[in-house]
Amino acid sequence: MKVSDFNYDLPQELIAQVPIKNRDESRLMVLNREKQTIEHKIFKDIIDYLEPGDCLVRNNTKVIPARLYGIKEETNANVEFLLLNRIDGDIWEVMVRPGKKLKAGAKVTFGDGILKAEILEQLDNGNRKVKFEYSGIFNEILDQIGLMPLPPYIHEKLKEKDRYQTVYAKYEGSAAAPTAGLHFTEELLEKLKEKGVEIANVTLHVGIGTFRPVKVENVEEHDMHSEHFYIKAEDAEKINKAKKEGHRVIAVGTTSCRVLESIADENGMVHETEGDTQIFIYPGYKFKCLDALITNFHLPESTLIMLVSALAGRDYIMKAYNEAVKEKYRFFSFGDAMFIK
């Protein structure tokens, strides 16, 4: 299977640069796998496709303002940090630019000195291990001086930080948003609960590796990035109850899907657990827990378009993507949504 099998032509103007005014009024493409049909709806219509007893599984990770601009001490050179993951306490793995200027021992100052960092070592992947120094609470300092780490294809400045955050974001740790969840409002979630839809949470901290291009020719040779996740017992119970009673488990986004498929047994049952996943889902994969998926439109040749192709079939997905281009859907993080049922 070639990576090029998952390519499609996307005009640049269809890449959404800003969020739509009302979260739940983005467009929704509905794919019915059994009938092989394509419907065009508005996201708030999702309520018509969910049934009492269905379990909606969402990722409640919270994006941290992980992009920092600072000055290298000694030379006053401008540098950029992107926080990737906390290794231990105030020691982080960080992507840096420009890398040549930031060798072990280099010191960087941010926000007029309220945050300082020392490069401890260069890691094998080119990132740096960094130790931060500050007074007060680290996350409060990040809120003060950090910027949201928007994907590289978004060039507009984000006016409101919370628009790159789901309304149910809770646990800080992501370098990118679980974007399928951006379409939900508190009101829509309340209506779903009133209808009898069960809502369960998982937490997967999305790494910047989610934007990393697939650089091999054959899909099977791709080395998938690792992401940390956990699921609590009460959420696992909701998912298992839906499975046992014959209802659907519907993931909000590929991140929720990856957690479910990483931990499910052969009967689709899940349990409380914490760990790291490198699961790579592409056509040929047999889903154990997932029955349906709410997702955004993904980059050509990405691992995420491979995941949705595993669920719905490559030909059907490519047909849907080509129709989305023709109908001028908005693509990627701030774009429109798809429901695969």
Image (cartoon, rainbow, N blue to C red):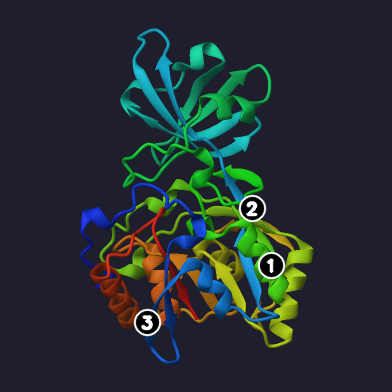
Kindly report the distance in space between the C-alpha atoms of the residues bearing marks 2 and 1. 11 Å
Residue 144 found in image quarter: top right
Q: Residues within 10 Å of mark 1 (few under 14, many from 20)?
A: some
Q: Quadrant of residue 326?
A: bottom left
Residue 136 point in image, percent of width and height: 68, 20
Q: Is residue 41 above or below residue 71?
A: below
Disc sitting over residue 199 in the figure: 1
Q: Position of residue 270 (x, y in %)?
A: 70, 72
Dot 2 corresponds to which residue? Answer: 168
> Regarding mark 2 in the picture, which secondary structure is present there?
loop
Say above or below: 73 vs 251: above
Q: Earlier in the sequence, mark 3 or mark 2?
A: 3
**Residue 317 appears left or right of 25:** left
Q: Amino acid at mark 3?
A: Ile
- Residue nearest the viewer, comparing 277 with 155: 155
Residue behind mark 3: 38
Q: Is residue 186 left or right of residue 316?
A: right
